[in-house]
Image (spheres, helix red, strand yellow):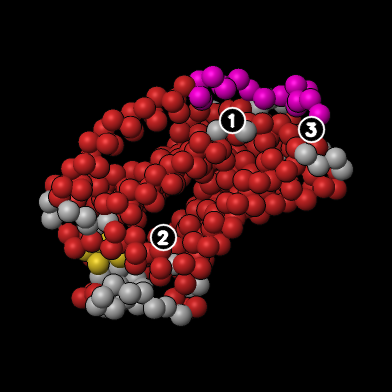
């Protein structure tokens, strides 16, 4: 395995981590519409907190997919063909979520706006839940043949482990969104977000225990890479403890940073377990390895140069946009 192959495996993991960090709270805000907003103005306020950012945050997912296609084409081919249905459903969730922002503003009736609020909630729930299922299935192992073709049954995609993984990711995104709402709003919405976060964090710890147990018995994480896997798992629990303390102690930034850190650490745990593979097969001899899945060294060199030029520009623009729209949203400021 070359240093460039290792670098791009790390960068793809980093891109997915940034995606879940930023888009995670967008999904959480979308899900929170059904739990926090009491009237149309409060719905407007919640949507306004992510309005300037949600589409920019999704760029990180496109970038991760594009980087995978260019740097690890065999990984891309196996993953996107083998998980075609799950990825199609994720895309459907992203589409109905994306159009709901625009269509809701052009509907004259309250009933019509309510419909698009439901689609926003549905799409915001579908995407993280299905991503959680897909990544969990990836590390659990799938029936892959010697040519890298994935031929799975329904039970390979939908099982206890994948469902728990989907619920865990969706719940983490919801809590991350609630912490973002606490940072971005004032008044009743902020108080309700804090109250709901206090209720959900104990549920999260139960979910983490179940997920860790399934990870222990259904993957090779703790036999192949015991030190790094246990370290990352402990850090996930500690980050969740810090986020819980922030919720109960009314420390908004602490909760938000810790919940974002939990999502980053979860991605790190999954990619750590994948290494040195990119796809885990139920037959270990058929697992797709980093060294066999990548593009040529020349391609990786060109991609590295392009990334060094473009990624800093994207980061600067992202930071600038959050700086410009950093004021808290209040319901009374929303104009119908």
The residue to which callout 3 is attached is 41
Question: Which numbered circle lies on residue 135?
Answer: 2
The residue to which callout 1 is attached is 52
Q: Measured from the top left, where is residue 291 in percent x and y?
A: 17, 59
N-terminal of the pair, mark 1 or mark 3, is: 3
Distance of mark 1 from mark 3, alpha carbons? 18 Å
Distance of mark 1 from mark 2, alpha carbons? 29 Å
Question: Which numbered circle lies on residue 151?
Answer: none
Q: Which corner quadrant of the image does residue 7 belong to?
A: top left
Q: Measured from the top left, where is residue 327 in percent x and y?
A: 60, 20
* For discs 1 and 3, the disc positioned in front in the rendered view: 1
- The residue under the point 79% across, 32% down is 41
Q: Measured from the top left, where is residue 31 in percent x and y?
A: 64, 47
- The residue under the point 26% across, 33% down is 308
- Left/right placement of residue 100 relative to residue 266 reads right
Against 258, is 150 above or below?
below
- The residue under the point 63% across, 48% down is 97
Segment colored magenta:
321-336
């Amino acid at each position: 395995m070359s240093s460039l192959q290792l670098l791009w495996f790390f960068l793809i993991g980093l891109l997915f981590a940034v995606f879940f960090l930023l888009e995670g709270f967008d999904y959480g805000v979308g899900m929170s519409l059904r739990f926090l907003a009491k009237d149309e103005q409060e719905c407007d306020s919640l949507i306004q907190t992510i309005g300037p950012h949600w589409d920019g945050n999704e760029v990180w997912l496109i970038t991760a997919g594009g980087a995978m296609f260019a740097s690890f084409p065999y990984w891309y081919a196996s993953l996107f063909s083998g998980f075609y249905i799950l990825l199609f459903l994720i895309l459907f969730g992203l589409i109905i979520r994306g159009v709901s922002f625009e269509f809701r503003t052009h509907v004259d009736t309250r009933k019509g706006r309510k419909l698009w609020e439901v689609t926003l909630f549905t799409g915001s729930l579908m995407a993280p839940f299905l991503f959680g299922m897909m990544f969990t299935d990836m590390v659990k192992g799938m029936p892959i043949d010697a040519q890298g073709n994935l031929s799975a049954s329904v039970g390979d995609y939908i099982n206890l482990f994948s469902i728990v993984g989907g619920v865990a990711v969706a719940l983490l995104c919801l809590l991350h969104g609630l912490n973002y709402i606490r940072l971005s709003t004032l008044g009743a919405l902020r108080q309700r977000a804090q109250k709901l976060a206090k209720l959900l964090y104990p549920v999260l710890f139960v979910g983490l225990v179940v997920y860790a147990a399934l990870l222990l018995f259904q993957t090779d994480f703790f036999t192949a890479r015991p030190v790094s896997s246990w370290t990352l798992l402990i850090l996930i629990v500690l980050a969740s403890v810090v986020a819980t303390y922030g919720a109960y102690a009314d420390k908004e930034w602490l909760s938000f940073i810790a919940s974002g850190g939990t999502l980053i650490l979860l991605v790190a745990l999954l990619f750590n377990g994948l290494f040195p593979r990119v796809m885990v097969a139920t037959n270990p001899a058929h697992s797709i390895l980093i060294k066999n899945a990548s593009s040529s060294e020349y391609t990786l060199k060109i991609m590295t140069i392009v990334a060094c030029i473009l990624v800093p520009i994207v980061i600067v623009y992202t930071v600038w946009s959050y700086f410009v729209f950093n004021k808290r949203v209040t319901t009374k400021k929303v104009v119908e």
